[in-house]
Image: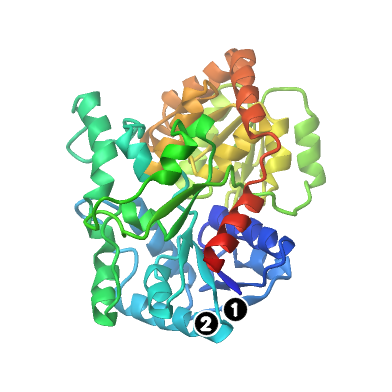
Amino acid sequence: MIVLFPHCGFLSETSRMLAIARALVAQGASVTLATRGGPYRRFLEESGLPLVDLEPRLDPPGVERFLAALLSMGQPDATPMLSVPEIRAAVESEVALLRDVGARAAVIGFTLTAFLSSRVAGVPLVTSHGGSFVPPVFERRLAPVPVTPPPGAEKAPAALLRFAANVAPAWVRAPVRELNTVARELGVEGVPSLAALMLGDLTLVTDLPEVLGVPRAELEAWRPWTGIFYRRSTRLRYVGPLFAELDLPVPAEVEDFLDDPSPKVYVSLSSSSAAHVRAVVARVREAGARVLVTRTVHDLDDLASDGVLVTDVLPNHLVMPRVDVAVTMGGQGTVQTAMASGTPLVGFPLQPEQDLNVALAERLGMALRIAPREGGTERTTAAVRSVLAELPRYRAAARRAQELYRGKDGPAACARAILERASA
């Protein structure tokens, strides 16, 4: 039995865990999905796969607090993502499940308490939520200069900011403080750093060497040289791209929108505030494009007009190939969907790993990065206008990326790697 713990506060993590779960079932494994809830739990329920609801339940205010804490992660005044009592209760619930079903491995999508519950239950932990944000990237200094520098560092030289982006994740401790408090109470191994919070006993690196820039042999041979920064058990494995292919219909009004030959921009900003989405949509409209925008958890119906269509969550893998530009926050799933679709991208990365995701597409010549604080400024209009003005060049670059991803089955590779680790 493989237990998967998707964090249903994130559409990307929910859909990625579903993709892995289905691939595991296709390879003959038994799976259980377990969640504390969230706005995207319904996709788990609709999947027909075994589903367990864990305690303590994650209500809408709890999801908002977690997301707000995540966005401030690493900053001096950041609030904890999870409280100590919440961690204690979640770990107890997860351990009971892992033992009850005889789990052979725990697979997580940002369900951070599983770093402890997997240790208590004595099962290997498999992670995918870190994407490509892994130590060999830092050692090669591939993490980019962030579009949003740390507070007080706005005027620092680019070389210094790049150095910090590649060194700081292994030194930052604040985001794991509460986890480590409970780890000491339980007498199990803690999490040494922010960087280690992305790494499991098996870390599924959901990209390709040709895109990430780290040779396969080098990445998969990497080992922690000390337990100060990373858990010594950490191992890395390339598995290829992993992005959502939600089994959802494309509504008729969306089909009509996509059939229109005029310039079309798809705005999908699921990990953002409603105010930010509104500001971005207004600026994209000023670039002369019609806008398709998903409302996800926000009420955005007031944006609807002749040039703006507001809709519910869509199957991105079917929609992105039919628009001229995709505008996203920079989560790996949506960036990779754009790459696999051959669609140029404008990204507003909030976190370091999102900076890396968009920067990889930018290095391939198919994307532009913008600081989220500039979402409501002329910078957004200029970026979208620039991509539309040079669309053949951006499309050609995006289609080169598409060729790299063509035929790669990331979920199947994830499933094989998980089953190998579970049987070790």
Q: Secondary structure at mark 1?
A: strand
Q: Residue at x 36, y 40 (%)?
A: 136
Q: Residue 154, position in %: x, y? A: 22, 31
Residue at 24% across, 33% down: 163
Residue 91 vertical placement versus 323 (above, below): below
Q: Can you give x and y, in whole percent of width and height, for residue 45 in the image?
A: 68, 70
- Mark 2–mark 1 contact, CB under 8 Å? yes
Quadrant placement of the N terminus: bottom right
Horizontal relation, residue 132 to residue 338: left or right: left
Q: Residue at x 28, y 37 (%)?
A: 165
- Position above or below: 19 against 310: below
Q: Amino acid at mark 2?
A: Leu
- Position of residue 32 relative to residue 251, above or below, is below
**Disc number placed over residue 404 in the picture, else none:** none
Residue 384 in the image: x percent, y percent? 54, 23
Hey, what amino acid is under mark 1? Val
The disc, 2 or 1, on the residue closer to the chain's N-terminal end is: 1
Where residue 263 appears, as percent x and y from the top left, is 68, 23
Q: Which mark is residue 52?
A: 1
Residue 97's disc is: 2
